[in-house]
Image (cartoon, rainbow, N blue to C red):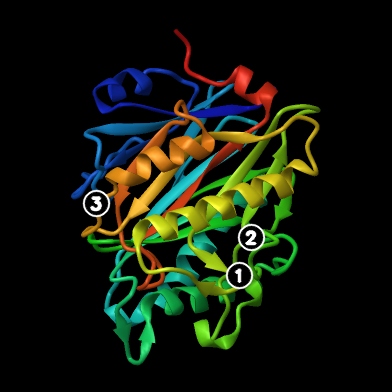
């Protein structure tokens, strides 16, 4: 049986979930987001388009919670959820700050007995701004790769799925899901793997897999989908929102099809998170996504900056097998 489920709920019910000892994480969106002493509350400082929503991660068993070297965690005995936020001393220090953040995050995961990060989310401000001749996203990629090399992580076969998203709030924020055993790295046949990008995208290639497939049982599968956009090969495609969205949906469809070659039951999206630039009207996108993946697929739209200046939209999410979907959802 899958060890946790993820679902969206109205933020008004947040306190009720905090009373459940199986809670692994409660993601709160908005800007600014107030910090919390509860290790299970994770702040994501991005405005939501649909009102007040929380993302609930509910484990199958009671979770142990705590803080290790500034890293907040919830440990169910099956999976580990972690998050931390570090302040920047100066705009040009993002690479070194990223190294420090990853070292602390991965050290905390190892200390709890979860050496395999499956999925890491990265948020920081001014993602497209150039500092000392280098775009901040590319500076982040330099730091991330240095940290992963220091961990002796296999940079082409065991990279976690990931997103890197621009906020308007200060600080580098990471949150992650880690496991005791590794998952399968899944790449998209329509795209060059990010870790093989040519040097025109920065001095170090982005260090992430397109998705991670995790088998939690014979028929319980999760696919953790990285931030996916309108990229074919390694080049960005199209200038308008809907053309970019269509290309993004084709990439998601191809990625899920690739993962389905390793599953006994077909995967389909259990939820999707959609990032759109602040000046873009996302209204037309909803119907197109529903047309591709079904009207019942839960969607969360957030205002955000994307890692490439020309990209207007990015989608990430979780896809699950039929049996895992059967187990999904909160208690009545």
Report the residue at 52% width, 87% height from top.
200
**Toward the viewer: 235 or 164?**
235
**Residue 42 seen in the figure:** no
| Front position among marks 2 and 3 | 3
| Front position among marks 1 and 3 | 3
Query: Residue 56 at x, y = what percent?
Result: 42, 30
Residue 209 image label: 2
Residue positioned most to the top? 332
**In the image, is residue 284 above or below residue 331?**
below
Distance between mark 2 and mark 3 Cα atoms: 29 Å
Which residue bears the numbered disc 1?
Answer: 194
Mark 3 crowdedness (10 Å alpha carbons): few <14, some 14-19, many ≥20: few
Question: Where does the C terminus fall, quadrant-wise?
Answer: top left
**Toward the viewer: 22 or 56?**
56
Choose the circle earlier in sequence order: 1 or 2: 1
Which residue bears the numbered disc 3?
Answer: 281
Residue positioned most to the left? 32
Report the residue at 21% width, 60% height from top.
279
């Amino acid at each position: 049986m899958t060890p946790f489920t993820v679902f969206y709920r109205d933020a008004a019910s947040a306190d009720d979930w905090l009373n459940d000892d199986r809670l692994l994480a409660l993601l709160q969106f908005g800007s600014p987001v107030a910090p919390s002493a509860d290790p299970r509350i994770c702040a994501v400082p991005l405005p939501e388009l649909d009102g007040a929503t929380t993302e609930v991660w509910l484990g199958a068993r009671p979770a142990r919670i705590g803080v290790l070297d500034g890293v907040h965690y919830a440990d169910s005995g099956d999976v580990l959820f972690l998050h931390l936020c570090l302040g920047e001393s100066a705009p040009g220090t993002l690479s070194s700050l990223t190294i420090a953040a990853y070292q602390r995050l991965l050290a905390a995961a190892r200390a709890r007995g979860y050496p395999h990060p499956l999925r890491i989310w990265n948020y920081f401000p001014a993602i497209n701004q150039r500092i000392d001749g280098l775009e901040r996203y590319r500076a982040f990629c330099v730091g991330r790769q240095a940290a992963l090399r220091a961990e002796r992580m296999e940079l082409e076969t065991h990279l976690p799925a990931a997103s890197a998203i621009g906020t308007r709030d200060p600080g580098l924020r990471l949150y992650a899901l880690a496991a005791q055993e590794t998952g399968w790295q899944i790449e998209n046949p329509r795209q060059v793997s990010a870790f093989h990008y040519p040097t025109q995208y920065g001095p170090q290639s982005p260090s992430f897999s397109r998705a991670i497939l995790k088998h939690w049982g014979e028929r319980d599968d999760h696919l953790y989908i990285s931030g996916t956009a309108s990229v074919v090969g390694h080049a960005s495609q199209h200038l308008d929102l809907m053309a970019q969205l269509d290309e993004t949906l084709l990439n998601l469809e191809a990625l899920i099809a690739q993962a389905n070659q390793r599953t006994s039951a077909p995967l389909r999206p259990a939820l999707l998170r959609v990032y759109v630039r602040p000046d873009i009207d996302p209204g037309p996108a909803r119907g197109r996504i529903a047309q591709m993946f079904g009207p019942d697929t839960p969607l969360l739209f957030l205002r955000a900056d994307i890692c490439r200046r020309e990209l207007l939209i990015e989608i990430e999410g979780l896809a699950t097998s039929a049996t895992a979907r059967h187990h999904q959802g909160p208690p009545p």
